[in-house]
Image: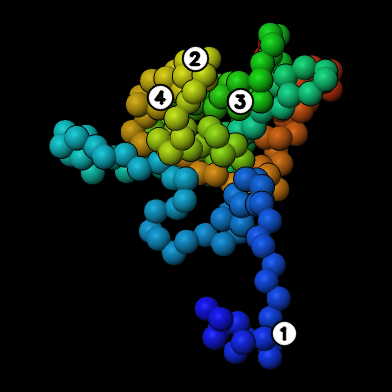
């Protein structure tokens, strides 16, 4: 060790300890530089049964997209969803939550409302996009839910998901989720301008 210290001293090498990395910063880096694997990071990977394989191999239903987000602020809590058809038609909804809700609650409310809307539209294959790492990873099995309330939301979402042919959840940066984010913020404020333009559920 002393030998290396002497050898390296001539190069003026300074040791700097690593500082702590915040979780959101790390998540942003992972999203900005995705891996080259065939399965996208955060994508839901389901191992189907033999019967499901036969049924799904014959299913060539088009894929819809669901962008979802929740908002929690001093004025209240809201959820925003944007369901997009294969032909790029958009169905937007905002929801005002008339009860106390945490950040995770509003994200799950947005997911569950979006899944229910997709079922109403007879969607079979659905890509879900969210900027909530907690929700995406809990649904995909990466994170465990530690609170009873979150566990209830998780099980409710999973019960709805199995009613589809296939659902994929993907984590996206906040900048790519602006439409749903704006709807969630408007819903949390019970924005009057939504009436007649975007359905506002309470």
Instruction: Quadrant for the C terminus, please.
Output: top right
Q: Residue 103, position in %: x, y? A: 66, 25
Residue at numbered disc 1: 12
* Residue at 69 percent of width and 11 percent of height: 100
Residue at numbered disc 2: 148
Q: CA distance from mark 2 to mark 3?
A: 12 Å
Secondary structure of the residue carrying tag 3 is helix
* Residue at 47 percent of width and 19 percent of height: 151
- Say the numbered circle drawn on residue 104: 3
**Is 148 on the left-hand or right-hand side of 45?**
right
Q: Quadrant of residue 73?
A: top right
Q: CA distance from mark 2 to mark 1?
A: 55 Å
Q: CA distance from mark 2 to mark 4?
A: 15 Å
- Say the numbered circle drawn on residue 158: 4
Secondary structure of the residue carrying tag 2 is helix
Answer yes or no: is residue 21 visible. Answer: yes
Q: Are marks 2 and 3 in contact (CB under 8 Å)?
A: no
């Amino acid at each position: 060790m002393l030998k290396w210290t002497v050898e390296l001293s001539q190069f003026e090498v300074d040791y700097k300890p690593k500082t702590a990395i915040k979780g959101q910063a790390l998540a942003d880096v992972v999203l900005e530089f995705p891996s080259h694997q065939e399965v996208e990071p955060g994508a839901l990977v389901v191992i189907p049964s033999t019967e499901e394989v036969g049924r799904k191999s014959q299913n060539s239903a088009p894929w819809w997209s669901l962008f979802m987000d929740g908002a929690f602020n001093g004025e209240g809590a809201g959820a925003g969803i944007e369901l997009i058809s294969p032909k790029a038609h958009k169905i937007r909804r905002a929801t005002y939550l008339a009860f106390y809700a945490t950040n995770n609650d509003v994200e799950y409310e947005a997911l569950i409302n979006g899944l229910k809307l997709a079922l109403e539209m007879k969607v079979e294959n659905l890509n879900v996009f969210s900027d909530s790492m907690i929700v995406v990873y809990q649904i995909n099995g990466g994170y465990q839910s530690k609170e009873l309330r979150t566990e209830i939301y998780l099980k409710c979402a999973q019960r709805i998901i199995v009613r589809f042919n296939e659902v994929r959840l993907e984590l996206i940066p906040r900048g790519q989720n602006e439409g749903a984010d704006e709807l969630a913020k408007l819903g949390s404020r019970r924005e009057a301008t939504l009436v007649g333009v975007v359905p506002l559920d309470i």
